[in-house]
Image: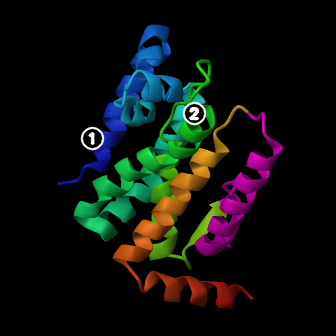
Amino acid sequence: MSILLPIIVITAGISLYAMKRPEVINQLVLSPYKIIHNKEYYRLLTHGFIHGSGMHLAINLFVLWEFGEIVEYEFGSAFPLLYIGGLLIAAIPAIKKHKDDVTYNSLGASGAVSAILMAFIVAHPSHTLLLFFVIPIPAILAGILFFVFERIMLAKGKTGIAHDAHLYGAAYGLVFALILDPNGINRMITALLDIF
């Protein structure tokens, strides 16, 4: 049975409900301070089911739907571990950096979605993706550009976006997929060589 659709429906439902209710956001958001000092560990998961805006939600759910269906088919029963693991791993940099900052909060499924995207790239590195919905590029190149862009934006700082969560989630997805599918490294190398 597919778990992708329930994840999407639950995330959309909770996010839309919470957007109109700040008290719900405050109860579910990733707050490193509250996780460490108040032992509110549930926030490690719940932050992935709320989003800051309709656009934030739409982008995450679009990417999750586009790549999640194939990734769930490829990785089967490991898919929930990939998704939930992406949420958890993506929270690490915020917890390390902001554990004593009572004002820091983060939300969204971007870390888990980044993990799904990278798992797709491991499985199908030669697949053509449309950058900005227009420019056709191989998935492996899209993955490289993703890491480069997120690293640059992280270095810039003060963007209001948790680029480190995207990087951690993507790195987790890459490693997770390669552990389950070691031949993915050969496919990625071949796809890179085909470009150059």
Secondary structure beneath label 1:
helix
Q: Position of residue 60 (x, y in %)?
A: 51, 42
The circle drawn on residue 178 is none
* Towards the viewer: 112 or 88: 88
Q: Label 1 amino acid?
A: Pro
The figure's colour scheme reads: rainbow
Name which residue type carries label 2.
His
When the figure is inspected, residue 139 is found, relative to residue 98, above or below; the finding is below
Residue under label 2, please give it: 56
- Quadrant for residue 141, please give it: bottom right
User: Percent position (x, y) of residue 94?
Assistant: 58, 38
Instruction: Identify the residue at horizontal 67%, vertical 90% (top origin).
Output: 193
Q: Nearer the viewer, residue 133 or 123?
A: 123
Q: Which mark is residue 6?
A: 1
Label 2 CA crowd tier, 10 Å (few <14, some 14–19, many 20+): some
- Say few, some or many: other residues with alpha carbon within 10 Å of mark 1 (under 14 / 14 to 19 / 20 or more): few
Q: Is residue 2 left or right of residue 109?
A: left
Q: Which residues are magenta?
A: 131-159
Q: Is residue 167 magenta?
A: no
Percent from the top left, x then y, of residue 155? 79, 48
Main SS, magenta region, reads helix
Q: In terms of secondary structure, where does tag 2 sit?
A: helix
Res 81 seen here: yes
The answer, for residue 63, to whether it is visible in the render is: no
The quadrant of the picture occupied by the N terminus is bottom left
Q: Vertical placement of 74 versus 72: above or below?
A: below
